[in-house]
Amino acid sequence: MLKFYYNPVSANVRRVWVALLEKQIPFEPILVNLDGDQFDNNFTAVNSLQRVPVIVDNGFRIIESLAILDYLEAKYPTRSLMPNDPENIAIVRMVEMVAVNELQLAMLLLTRPLVGLDVDNQKLDAAKERVISVMQFYENMLEKHSYFVGEELTLADIVAGTLLPSLYLFGFSLDPYHRLKAWLERLAIRESWQQTTPQPEVVEAALPNIRKILERRS
């Protein structure tokens, strides 16, 4: 059975977790606590970069969430989370890359003051502006559809949709973005979202460990 190394507060983990559930792929969950388990020799042997998620499928190990998603889609094509049309494939990739390269990086910077770490105010303001730009970009892309690609959930929705709900932690409101807000509400009622959404107290308890991780990356 596929082994899934995870921690519930990680957005990178959650996008893989949602995909596994949506595709109904059986897996063995292996919790990696972020209070030091990631530096344990046993886990370092699984991923020398010492971070989650990781999957091991029939002895084949994959790290990095987007690579894992591509593998799952190719290895387990039913239920498909990637369209076949070239334009729709491009939409999925655009949404994914904007989420990872723009939104997630800005959110990491905004997390620093949340956990008591210093950050340059100018960089903080730039990160906030970047988040607003991404929200407007996604608002425009949704148009009149239920999801980014028509009426079917794709990897685009999973990658972006597991990041955006955390914006409330940084004081952002989704009220001006009606399509985006409705889209997130639509995702929130899916069973895969409900199973993987971390409880607020779990996130709160994880903040000291998140601080240590960000300090190591400084």
Image (cartoon, rainbow, N blue to C red):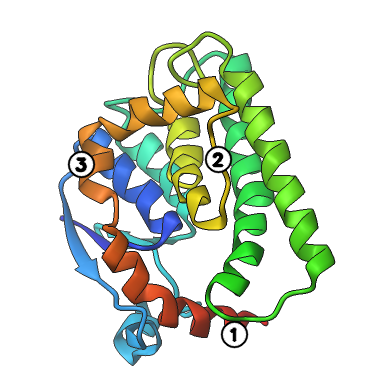
SS under mark 3: loop
Q: Is residue 100 left or right of residue 192?
A: right
Residue displayed at 45% across by 38% down: 161
Q: Residue at x 51, y 80 (%)?
A: 211
Residue under label 3: 25
Residue count near mark 1 (Cα–Cα under 10 Å), binned few <14, some 14–19, many ≥20: few
Separation of disc 1 and disc 3 at Cα? 35 Å
Point out the frontmost of discs 3 and 2. Answer: 2
Q: Is residue 164 left or right of residue 132?
A: left
| Observer able to see residue 59 | no
Of callouts 1 and 3, which one flags the residue occurring earlier in the amino acid sequence? Answer: 3
* Res 214 → quadrant: bottom right
Q: Is residue 171 above or below residue 201?
A: above
Residue at position x 32%, y 85% in the image:
37
Q: What's the residue type where badge 1 is placed?
A: Glu
- Give the spatial CA distance, label 2 vs label 1: 28 Å
Q: Nearer the viewer, residue 211 or 151?
A: 211
Name the element at disc 1: helix
**Which residue is denoted by mark 1 in the rendering?**
215
- Tell me which amino acid carries mark 2: Ser
Residue 77 at least partly seen: yes
- Residue count near mark 3 (Cα–Cα under 10 Å), binned few <14, some 14–19, many ≥20: some
Whether 6 is drawn above or below 80: the answer is below
- Viewer-proximal residue, 210 or 20? 210
Which numbered disc covers residue 173?
Answer: 2
